[in-house]
Image (cartoon, coloured by chain):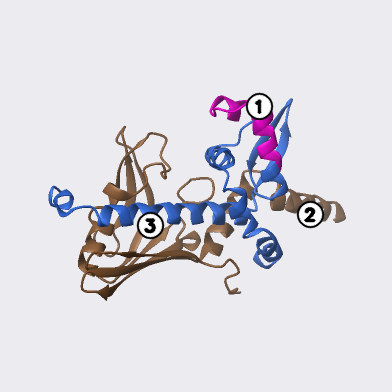
Chain colours: A blue, B brown
Amino acid sequence: MVSLLLPFVDAYGDAGLGLLGDPTRRAIFELLARRPSSVGELAQQLPVSRPAVSQHLRVLKDGGLVVDQAQGTRRVYRLNPAGVTALRAYLDRIWDDALTAFQKAVEAPDDREQEH
Amino acid sequence: MNMAPTIPPLGGKVTVGVPVERAFRVFTDSFTTWWPPDYHIGGAAMAEAILEPREGGRWYERGVDGTECDWGRVLAWEPPHRLVVTWQVNGHWQFDADPAHASEIEVRFTAAGPEQSTVELEHRLLDRLVDGQALRDGISGGGGWSAILELFAKAAANEE
């Protein structure tokens, strides 16, 4: 199974990071990481219109990060269950943010640390 | 059969203007002061992120409602130069308790001068995390591989 996933990583591994460069798209991606949702549910949680959400979802789907599935009358979006690109892209974002935050904290003036 | 890792490790590196001892201390003791609070898995907002300072220690979050969610375990505690923890949070933002699905994070602290340190982070063994996730997806009846395997199972059953 793992070896079958490899071409997928090669094809989309770096593209995934580019796709998540847009803040709204990243927000959608992060909401879907928490739970599968419909376009309407995503739009309710974001300051953008439903058509805008749909458009971002299409880009994420074309990039292999997100898949959709009909559930009754609804279409539900979720992260690609194969998971490699989505997980890797998201973790990469986390480490980037975390190391930046760490750098800021560690270089803060001494008195801050002494309070602890 | 043991397969070589196919998902390349992730990582990052920062240089900070403090001695290596302080870099290690802030990274670990003061973990909760700098960890981005948006990155958590509990249902409630995160109140605290805790890294227990010993081998075998827990690495977890505590929510504002008091609930605790594990992220992983401390595998190596070697102040002030090296820290290894497991990361057992999968793509569904759920803790996977199975050690076979645990990915690893190694953080190395190296002196780059009397008042400067390099902090390098490597997140590896991502295959384990993804294997666990694929397994879980299969159980919960998602698309992708599980759908293909279901078709296969049906086909195989019809052969008999």
User: CB under 8 Å between callouts 2 and 3?
Assistant: no
What are the residue bounds of the magenta stretch?
Answer: A39-58
Which residue occupies the extreme right position in the image? Answer: B159
Q: Is residue A60 above or below residue A72?
A: below
Q: Secondary structure at mark 2?
A: helix
Mark 2 Cα within 10 Å, few/some/many (few <14, many 20+)? few
- Does dot 1 land on a helix, a strand or a loop? helix
Q: Which residue is mark 3?
A: A99
Q: Amino acid at mark 1?
A: Arg
Residue at image location 62% in from the left, 54% down from the top: A16
Between marks 3 and 1, how big is the CA–CA gap?
A: 34 Å
Label 3 is found on which chain of the structure?
A
Which mark is nearer the camera, 1 or 2? 1
Quadrant where the N terminus of chain A lies?
bottom right
Give the percent coordinates (x, y) of residue B55: 28, 65
Circle 2 residue: B152
Q: Which residue is mark 1?
A: A50
Magenta span contains residue A53: yes
**B32, B152: nearer the viewer:** B32
Looking at the image, is mark 3 or mark 1 earlier in the sequence?
1
Q: Chain of mark 1?
A: A
The CA span between labels 2 and 3 is: 44 Å
Q: Main secondary structure of the magenta part?
A: helix
Residue at image location 26% in from the left, 57% down from the top: A106
Q: Are marks 2 and 3 on the same chain?
A: no
> Is residue B99 found inside the magenta-colored segment of the image?
no
Name the residue type under label 3: Leu
Which residue is located at x 65 percent, y 27 percent? A50
